[in-house]
Amino acid sequence: MPNFQAAIEVIRADITKLDVDAIVNAANTSLLGGGGVDGAIHRAAGLGLLADCRTLGGCATGDAKITRGHDLPARFVIHAVGPVWHGGTFDEDRLLASCYSTALRLAQEHELSSIAFPAISCGVYHFPVERAARLAVRTIREILPTCSGIKRVILVAFDARVEDALRSALDESV
Ligand code: APR
């Protein structure tokens, strides 16, 4: 059944504070934590999250795995591994899109109705922000009709540049 009701919104926030079914982590292939949003999520979730992640055996770039949220307000964390930007000819676009589609499908499988994404790969992995924002919005719009349980998708910006890029991408997509 197509999903006509899903809302996609852009907010400026610290993703670790959001009371949603799942927040998405911009992780690395080890899933054992790092800096940026990965570090913030692990700090806020507590050591139980790391213990969970140790059982997952890592995660390939473009893929995503789910754990509980532990001490976070969010019930689950979906750990997605975005591509490092190498100029655009190393399959980066497809791998980044795959992070969003895989995370949405995982949320649907776990009957979650609200999910918040950070700007995956737009920090340490240096993916061009405007390009990533367009890819994210396009992929979410493509996949949502097949994820009838998801009612709310939040794109979380942590700085003004990402917020502007996400808002522009969303406005252009309607
Ligand atoms: N809430 C929301 N967004 C955040 C937060 C936060 N608390 N902290 C950082 N961000 C934003 C950054 O400003 C950036 O726009 O998340 C986006 C992704 O940046 P990174 O966290 O650097 O992630 P990424 O570029 O995907 O690099 C992943 O960095 O932290 C390591 O272990 C991680 O190796 C992996 C790599």
Image: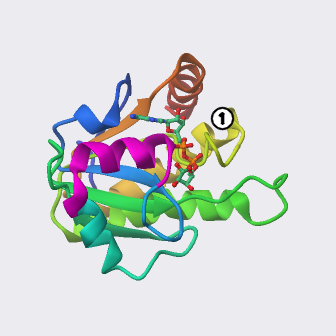
Tell me which segment is drawn in magenta.
34-48
Give residue 23's position: percent from left, percent from top: 30, 48
Residue 64 horizontal side relative to residue 122, left or right = left
Give residue 4's position: percent from left, percent from top: 27, 46
Residue 47 horizontal side relative to residue 10, left or right = left
Identify the main secondary structure in magenta: helix
Circle 1: element type: helix
Residue 160 horizontal side relative to residue 130, left or right = left
User: Is residue 115 covered in magenta?
Assistant: no
Q: What residue lies at 81% left-to-right and 55% top-to-bottom?
A: 86
Q: What's the colour scheme? A: rainbow
Q: Quadrant of residue 129?
A: top right
Q: Quadrant of residue 131?
A: top right
Q: How many marks?
A: 1
Give residue 58's position: percent from left, percent from top: 45, 77
Which amino acid type is shown beneath numbered disc 1? Val
10 Å neighbourhood of mark 1: few (<14), some, or many (≥20)? many
**Considering only vertical position in the picture, is 57 above or below 23?**
below
Whether residue 8 can be seen here: no
Whether residue 144 can be seen here: yes
Q: The N terminus appears in which quarter of the rendering? A: bottom left
Q: What residue lies at 25% left-to-right and 71% top-to-bottom?
A: 52
Q: Quadrant of residue 155?
A: top left
Q: Depth check: 16 or 12 in front?
A: 16
Q: Depth check: 58 or 43 in front?
A: 43
Queried on whether the Cβ of the residue with tag 1 lies below 8 angstroms from ligand 1, the answer reads yes
Q: Residue furthest front?
A: 47
Residue 57 horizontal side relative to residue 112, left or right = right
Q: What residue lies at 59% left-to-right and 26% top-to-bottom?
A: 165
Q: What residue lies at 23% left-to-right and 52% top-to-bottom?
A: 150
Label 1, on which residue?
129
